[in-house]
Image (cartoon, rainbow, N blue to C red):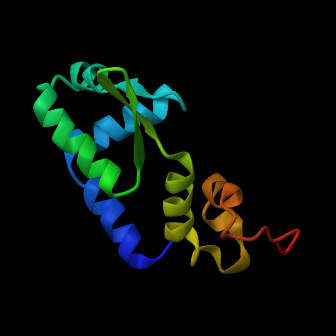
Amino acid sequence: MNQETAVSALAALAQDTRLSAFRRLVQAGPDGLLAGEVAEAMGAPPSTMSHHLGQLERAGLIRSRREGRTVAYAADYDAMRRLLGFLMEDCCQGAPEICGPLALSTPACPSKETGQ
């Protein structure tokens, strides 16, 4: 991931409703939720939620798919991992225990024991 893409993703998440919607989609799993379900869970009007989901999709954090006359949204877990990897790639200086369990599970931060 490059810095421009990371800034776009972080900017999309830097809004309360969008961050909550993204977290809800992450919790929902790979099948995601219908747009109306997300709006209901967030207590937001469908048109407002549609705008927020569009922002998250343009930032590459979620994906949409048509299901008849409705649209379902799901978190893009690979994009989320790339963003976390980007944020962690300069961490640790070869000692992942400094950053804790997150660093140990992030491919960009090599394990001290394996050197990988």
In the rendered image, the vertical position of residue 44 relative to residue 95, given as above or below: above
Residue 108 is drawn in which quadrant? bottom right
**In this rendering, would 74 be left or right of 34?**
right
Point out the image quarter for the C terminus: bottom right
Residue 14 percent location from the top left of the image: 24, 55
Residue pictured at 33% horizontal, 70% vertical: 7
In the rendered image, the vertical position of residue 48 relative to residue 80, given as above or below: above
- The number of discs equals 0
Of residues 13 and 96, the one drawn nearer to the viewer in this rendering: 13
In the rendered image, the vertical position of residue 37 relative to residue 110, given as above or below: above
Residue pictured at 47% horizontal, 30% vertical: 27
Residue pictured at 27% horizontal, 55% vertical: 12
**In this rendering, would 26 be left or right of 19?**
right
Residue pictured at 39% horizontal, 37% vertical: 23
Of residues 105 and 58, the one drawn nearer to the viewer in this rendering: 58
Residue 39 is drawn in which quadrant? top left
Residue 71 percent location from the top left of the image: 33, 29
Residue 1 percent location from the top left of the image: 51, 71
Q: Residue furthest front?
A: 68
Residue 84 percent location from the top left of the image: 52, 60
Residue 69 is drawn in which quadrant? top left
Of residues 4 and 86, the one drawn nearer to the viewer in this rendering: 4
Q: Residue furthest right?
A: 114
